[in-house]
Image: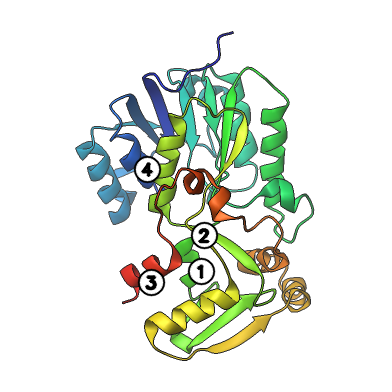
Amino acid sequence: MQPHNPAKNQKILVLGAGELGLAVVRALVLNPAAEVAVMLRPVAPEAISSERHQALRELESLGVEVLAGDAVNDSEEHLAASFNAFDTLVSCLGFVAGPGTQRKLTRAALQSDIKRYVPWQFGVDYDAIGRGSPQDLFNEQLDVRDLLRAQSRVQWLIISTGMFTSFLFEPGFGVVDLDNNTVRALGSWDTAVTVTTAHDIGRLTATILFDSTLRNQVVYIAGDTLTYGQLADTVERLLGRTLERVEWTVPALEADLRAEPDDQLRKYRAVFAQGRGVAWDKARTYNGERQIETTNVVRWIEQNLL
């Protein structure tokens, strides 16, 4: 079989139109070689949220076809049949879709006629973290990688992005908690984290999809990589205020998780605190090596907090 050439025209199906899905679609439609469609879960008209209405209006304005499909309830065979008409499948359906969905989508993709699959792995380096981490959802991401690596018919790309930049500033996550004038380190002040905005993930994904040198590999991108100490210094300097600094050590976060073992935020805090597979050198990323500008934490604060 001839290898898929992504430099030519491509029919691309994006699964989901949330924050990340829309960012990917907005970037893809700028490429005249991309014919873009989006698969969305069917919703009764009376149950459509204002956010969904807004997304549908934007997709219509962009000339993007919307297909009905339910990753949770449709069979693998049904999903595979829906994928058949496309060259590349990009999943922007995250963990909110529920356990088992990532494996199901991967099996459906491998049953279909698509030439290339980009699974929803827009996050950390699951290979480096390994199985049995505090965040048990990560085991399924490794199952997806095993499925892709065990076959040769469908090309694949995994795009590792680190944490969404905005998540660092979510009060519920507890790292930058401006309401309580506090910044907290996960693990230690020297522990590092890589972050990327959804906008940058979208435009870099669109670029990577048309890079014919990339296939069957993990591609790293980064908006910024910094330690929690550097984060605290940056927030204080830009906002002109002194924050209380609290270090959440690995043993303390693991104890918190044992007390509430089903709490997803506690799982994420514990795995990021371990510092393994959650940060990489920006200079050695896809965008860093090509000197593609991305939004660092300083720019994000300037755009969102000042």
The residue labelled by disc 4 is 43
Is the Cβ of the residue at disc 4 closer than 8 Å to that at disc 1? Answer: no
Give x and y (percent) for residue 98.
Answer: 59, 48
Quick one: label 4 or label 2, which is nearer the N terminus? 4
Is the Cβ of the residue at disc 2 closer than 8 Å to that at disc 1? Answer: yes
Calculate the distance from the C-alpha at mark 1 to the C-alpha at mark 3.
11 Å
The residue labelled by disc 3 is 301
Marks 1, 3: nearer the viewer: 3
Quick one: label 3 or label 2, which is nearer the N terminus? 2
Marks 4, 2: nearer the viewer: 2
- Of 58 and 78, nearer the camera is 58
Calculate the distance from the C-alpha at mark 3 to the C-alpha at mark 2.
13 Å
The figure's colour scheme reads rainbow
Quick one: label 2 or label 1, which is nearer the N terminus? 1
Give x and y (percent) for residue 74.
Answer: 53, 32
Give x and y (percent) for residue 181.
Answer: 47, 88
Q: Secondary structure at mark 2?
A: strand
Could you tell me which quadrant the N terminus lies in? top right
Q: Residue furthest left?
A: 61
Q: Is residue 40 visible?
A: no
The residue labelled by disc 2 is 195
Q: Secondary structure at mark 4?
A: loop
Residue type beneath disc 3: Ile
State the mark number for residue 168.
1
Q: Is residue 259 visible?
A: yes
Marks 4, 3: nearer the viewer: 3
* Residue drawn at x 51%, y 81% as measured from the top left: 233
